[in-house]
Amino acid sequence: MAKILDVLARQVWDSRGRPTVEAEVAVKGARGRAIAPAGASTGSGEAKSVDVRQAVHSINTEIRASFTGKTLDQETLDRLLLALDGTPDKSRLGGNAIVAVSLACAHALAAAAKQPLWRLLAGKRAVAMPVPQIQIFGGGAHAHGRMDVQDFMIICTGAGSFTEALEWTAQVYQAAGARLAKRGALHGVADEGGYWPAFKSNEEALAELTGAIADAGFEPGADVGIALDIAATQLWRDGRYHLALENRALTASQLHALLLQWIERYPIVSIEDPFAEHDGEAMASFTRTAGERIQVVGDDFLVTSSQRLKEAKAIGACNAVLLKPNQAGTLTETLACWRAAQEAGYGAIVSARSGETEDVTIVHLAVGWGVPQLKVGSFARSERMAKWNEGLRIEEALAGAQLPYPARRLFRRSARAP
Ligand code: PGA
Ligand code: ZN
């Protein structure tokens, strides 16, 4: 705990050149600062952001008046934010205002304790570095729908450390770029830094990514697996999943069959949001069929809500959850969802948004809370690299004192050549 001396906010700019909220919390001799990120493919159950000028104004007036002079812990500060807002979806003060203040408080408390945030969150517990999910091709809402599937990512399942995973990723990312350039299929990079490719089908992207893993000298499956984010809510219209690139519309059971075919043909170890956010039945059915082999992740489907996670567990939908602090709103609610995931036996991935900044808080959350995976986007653009590089610094600080790196344990079942 530390006495809060002041709270202020300003408008800053994110990686898409859009305005966002930065909050600063002053304590004796130190300050904490955090910036709200923003999604493009958002779930309808997320905390609602408001106009940035309005969010900044609310922080500089209401939140400032309520927080200044208080000596409270994170949980009580977060509860105060929720009480001040008073709405179930945080639409009065705004999810963007609330998450910026909540995270800035965490940084201020860590600064007051003269500890890095990850260390403050871990307390006396030993921690491990999280396993990165790194985007190689970007599509969906992050590339004007040029590909239907939003994220084609890799997980270096055979790497022995976070540092090694990034080294391997750099090689795969370069190899993928070289393949695309050779074919004249490179259209720059998408919102999260993954290549924006001109492919004729979604499956072609899977084949090219598997090829790039091999080109870089790795064994697809054993060394490096593929993770997809279908972000299927974006594909859902009039009762069908629309694959615009392939000019076809699938029922849930046809999409289910297509994904199983992809799992058979390619070294896929994880699929996020395979069905739309409302389609719990399809999620449960897919988890029953594929969940033994691969990780089935809920993002828009679970929106970092411990309540939705418990409901998903009850019907057997998904076996892992994406944790996005700005979906939940506060740090405390994000942590509650991680605790619910642990109770339910679900995996978890702390995740960035498609609109990001130099803010690296999420890396500290993953390490400090012991969340075993981290998703930040691709291996380009400084709002992404700032986070990977922060992870390198933390792994160096842990030097020899950390728990074993969890990649092989997490993906042993699925880490095999197709
Ligand atoms: P978003 O995308 O930040 O645009 O929602 C990230 C994701 O879907 O995981
Ligand atoms: Zn997603």
Image (tube, helix red, strand yellow):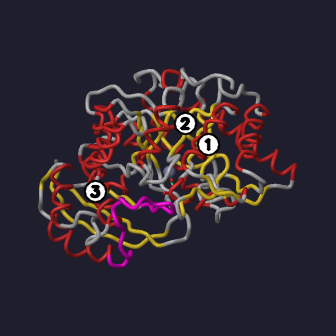
Neighbours of disc 2 within 10 Å: few (<14), some (14-19), many (20+): many
Q: Secondary structure at mark 2?
A: strand
Residue where numbered disc 2 is placed: 270
Residue type at tag 1: Met
Seen in the image, is 280 located left or right of residue 177? Answer: left
Cα separation between marks 3 and 1: 30 Å
Visible in this render: residue 229? yes
Amino acid type of disc 2? Ser
Residue 329 point in image, percent of width and height: 31, 57
Residues under labels 1 and 2: Cα distance? 9 Å
Of the residues shown, which amino acid type is indicated by label 3?
Answer: Ser
Magenta part mainly helix, strand or loop?
Answer: loop
Residue 28 x %, y %: 20, 55
Q: How many marks?
A: 3
Mark closer to the chain start, 3 or 1: 3
Q: Which mark is residue 153?
A: 1
Q: Are marks 1 and 2 in contact (CB under 8 Å)?
A: yes
The residue closer to the viewer here, 396 or 140, is 140
Which one is nearer the viewer's eye here, 213 or 291? 291
Residue 102 image label:
3
Q: Secondary structure at mark 3?
A: helix
Q: Quadrant of the C terminus?
A: top right
Q: Nearer the viewer, mark 1 or mark 2?
A: 2
Q: Is the CB of mark 3 within 8 Å of ligand 1? A: no
In the picture shown, does residue 292 fall above or below 92?
Answer: above
Residue closest to the eye, 378 or 87: 87
Viewer-closest of 246 and 219: 246
Residue 170's image quarter? top right
Label 2 beta carbon within 8 A of ligand 2: no
Please state if 398 lies on the left or on the right of 173 as rendered.
left
> Which segment did they paint magenta?
37-54
* Cα–Cα gap, marks 2 and 3: 30 Å
